[in-house]
Amino acid sequence: MVTGLDLHATLYRIVLDAVGTVPSAQRGSLLARDGEQLVYKASVGLAGVLASPQEVAGEAGPATAIATLSTLDSADSARVMAAADWYREHLPGAPSLHLVPAGAVVVLTPVRVQGQTIGVLAVEQPDGQAPSDERWARLRALAESAGAALERRELYNDKARSAQEVRVLEAVLSAVAAQNSPPELVETISKGLKSVQLRPEWRSVHLVLLSDAPAGGSRGDAAARELRIYHVPQRAPVAYWNNLRDGALVAGRSLGVHVDVRNVPAHSAAEQRGLLEDGIDRRVHGIAVAPITPEVLDPAIRRAVDAGIPVVTIDSPPVEGSCAQAYIGTDNVAAGRLAAQMMARLLPDGGKVGAMTFWLSAINSRERIEAFRATVSGAPLDLQPPAEDRFDMELGMRIAREAAQTGGLAGALGVCAENGLSWGTAARALGRAGELKIVAFDLLTDTLAMLREGTIHAALVQREHDMGYRAVRLLHDMRSKGVEAALAGLPTRAGSGGASALRFIDTGIDVVTLERTPWSLPLSDYLALDTSRKAAKRREQIPHASGAMDLLFIGVNAGEEGFREERAPLDAGSMVGRVLSTARSILVDTHSSELHDAPDVAEARRNGAHTLVGVPLLAGGSAFGVLVLESGRRGACSPDDLTMIERVVDTMAVAIENTQLVRRITERTVELEQANRHQESLLGTIRELSSPVVPIARSILVMPIVGTMDAERSGRFIESMLRDITERHARVVLVDVTGMAVVDAASVEHLLRAARAARLLGAEVVLVGITPAAARLMVEQNVDLGSVVTRSTLELGFTYALSNTGGQIVYRRSPPLS
C-alpha cells in the first residue's frame, strides 16, 4: 500500500488495525479537525450510520469538537469515555445507540502533528475495560501513523493550493491581456477560486461593474448609476477545449498566421462538416479539426485534400484510411494502459471497475477502453461494460450513481474529461468518497478539487494546449514547405501503413496525484510544469515564411453557453451598494447579518445561500465593480479565504483598469488624429483662399496675398503660380500685396524668387498694392526690387499688363433705360 496514492485506504487500514488491537472491538473511527469541526476521515463498523466518510462529527456544534481536542491535548496519551456519551456527541443523529453494549467505552487516542492535537482515533471497547499498556502503545503508534499521513497530505495540499493560486493570478492577467469579454473573465476567476478554495464550495460567482461615468462625472460618482451584472452558468464550457483553442492562437501569433477558431456543440457532427465545407469554399490554407464523428467528416476531409488544402485531426484520430495527413493528440492505447496500471495499484485485491465515456463510438474512447481491458486481463480486476453519457453530465451522474450504488463497484474509470466528475459526484452522494477508487482523464476545475480532497485518486492529464499549438505549426509548415517536407520524419500511427499512412504527433500525457508516488507527479509540480510549458510557448520565436496565411480550426463546445448579462439600477441599500460606497469587502451570513433585508442578500437566501461575499474592484481609491460569491455553507469563508479572494480581485482590478486606460488613451488618440486631420484640411482651405489665382484677361493673372509670406507658403505660392502660368499661357502675373501683414526684406525676397521663376517661363511678375507704410519699411531696410515692376494699385497694374500684352481698355456707354 502506497500512502501517497490513496489516503482513504491508508487511514482505513489504520482504523482496522486499531479495532483489531482492542479485544472484541467492532467499531472504530478516525476523526480530524477541519476548521472548527471534527470530520470523519475513516471508520470501521459504522456503515449505514455515516452518510459519508467526510461527514461532520455530530450536531453538538464546534464547541464540543474543540473541547474534545483540548481534553486530549492535555492528556499524556489517551483517555476513555462512555460509548453512549461519545456517540451521542459525535455520531451524526446517533441513530444506533441501542446497539451499543451496556457499559461499553470508547478508547480515545490523540492524533498529533508537530505536538498539536489535530484529531482522534476512537475505538469502541465493548467490555468497558481499559486497554493494557501494550495495546495503548500500539494505539499510540497507529495514531502517529495517522498523523504522519494527514500531515503529508496537508503539506501536499497546501503546496498544490499555492501553485494553483499563482496559476489563477496568471490566468486572470492573461484573460485581461487577451481582452476577453467580462463573462469569460468572471468564468476564469470562478473556476480558479473553486479550484483553490475547497471548503467554501462556491456555488455562484458573478461580476458586477458600474456603468461608465456620465458626462461631467467621475468614476467615483456611483449615485444613479447603472450596474452591469455578468453571471456564469453552473456548468460553463469545458476548459479542455478552451486550452486547445488557446494553444492554437498562441502558435498563430508567433507565426503571424490568422487562426479562425470555430466551435460547435458536442452532438453536432453535421455542423462540423458544414464548417469544413465552408473552409474549402473560402480556400483557407489549412484545416485542423477535432472530429466528433470521424465517419461524417471523412468525405469533406477528402474533398479538402483533393483541393490542395492540408488537413490534420486533433484530440481524436480520423477513420482508418482517411485522407487526413496527420493526427495530433494523445496515444490513447498508452493512456489506457496507464489508467489500468493506476487502478491495479489502487485495488491490489481486485474488484469490479465501472467505466464511462462520452461516446462509445469515438475512436479515442474505444482505444482507451480496449487497452485498459487488455492490460487488466490477467489481474483480478473486472471491467464492467462501459456506459456513455453523450456529453450530458446530468445523465452521467445518474448512470454513475446507479452503478456505484447497485453494481458492487470497487473502482471507476472516467474515460473522458467530465466522466471522472460524474463518478466523483456519485461517490460523494453515496458516502463512498475516497472508498470508491476513481481514475479520471484531464484536469478540469472540479477534477482538481476532487483530487485535492481525495474523491478522485489519479488523473491522466492530456496536453491539449500542445495539441492546438502543434496543429497550427504543422499546418503552417505544410503550407510553406510543402506537405511531404513537413511530414518527413514524423512517425506513422500504429495500424496505418502504405504510402498514405497517417502521421502521428504524440503530445504525451501526465499522470497526476495529490502526493508524489513512483508512478505520478504531485499536483503542485504538475501545475508549475504546465504553467512553464505554456509560458515557454508564448516566448518562443519561430522562424516562419512571410505572407498572409488563413487557417481554420474547428473544435468542440462541450458546455452550455448560458452566460447572462443583466442591467439593473444601483440600490444603495444592497450589499453591492454598500461595497461600492465603502470600497471595502463585506462578508454576510444571509440569515443573521444586519444586511438580512437587503434585496440581494434576501435573493441569495431564497436561492439557498448561507454565505455571501462581496469584494470591491478598486481604482484610485474608489470601487468600480464588485465580485460576488455565494456558498450554501454557513460560515464558509475564512479570513484566509477572503484574503486570497482579495488578492485575485486586486490583480483583476489593476489589469482591468490598465486595459481600460489603454482603451481610453487609444480612443483619445484616434479623436485627436481625427481633429488634426480636420484642422489640416481647414488650414489647406485657408491657404488656398489666401493665395488664389484669378485670370482677369487673356494672358493676365492676378494673385492676391493675404497674411504673411514665409518659406513654406512661398514654396506653395511659387508652385501654384508656375502651374497656372503654364496651364493658362499667362504673360503677366499681378501679385497684389495689399493684404500682406508685413512687407519686409524677408517677404520681398520670397516675392523676388517668384518673379525669377516666372521669368524662366516667359512671364513677368508685377507687384501691385504696395502701401506707403510698406514702401517706407522697404526703404528703411534697403530692399532692392531690382527689375521687378511695381504699381501702386491693381488698376494701374492691370493697365500696364494690357499694354504689354497688346490689349486695351475700351469704355462703352450703356444704352439708356427705357
Image (tube, rainbow, N blue to C red):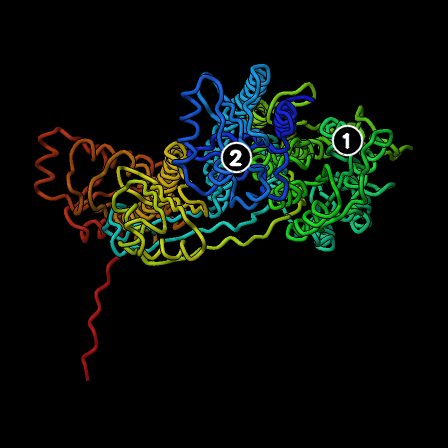
Q: Provide the residue designation for mark 1.
A: 340
Check residue 83 in the rendering and tell me which mark sits there, or answer none: 2
Q: Residue at x 26, y 54 (%)?
A: 572
- Asked if residue 193 lies left or right of residue 694, the reply is right
- Asked if residue 675 lies left or right of residue 198, the reply is left
Q: What percent of the width, then of the height, locates residue 179?
A: 47, 41
Q: What percent of the width, then of the height, locates residue 28?
A: 59, 31
Looking at the image, do the residues carrying marks 2 and 1 touch, with CB atoms under 8 Å apart?
no
Check the image and report above or below for 798 versus 330: below
- Say how many tags the image has: 2
10 Å crowding of disc 2: few (<14), some (14-19), many (20+): many
The image quarter in which residue 633 lies: top left
Amino acid type for the residue under numbered disc 1: Ala
Check residue 331 in the rendering and tell me which mark sits there, or answer none: none
Q: Is residue 805 visible?
A: no
Q: CA distance from mark 2 to mark 1?
A: 43 Å
Check the image and report above or below for 140 versus 469: above
Q: Is residue 499 visible?
A: yes
- Asked if residue 343 lies left or right of residue 101, the reply is right
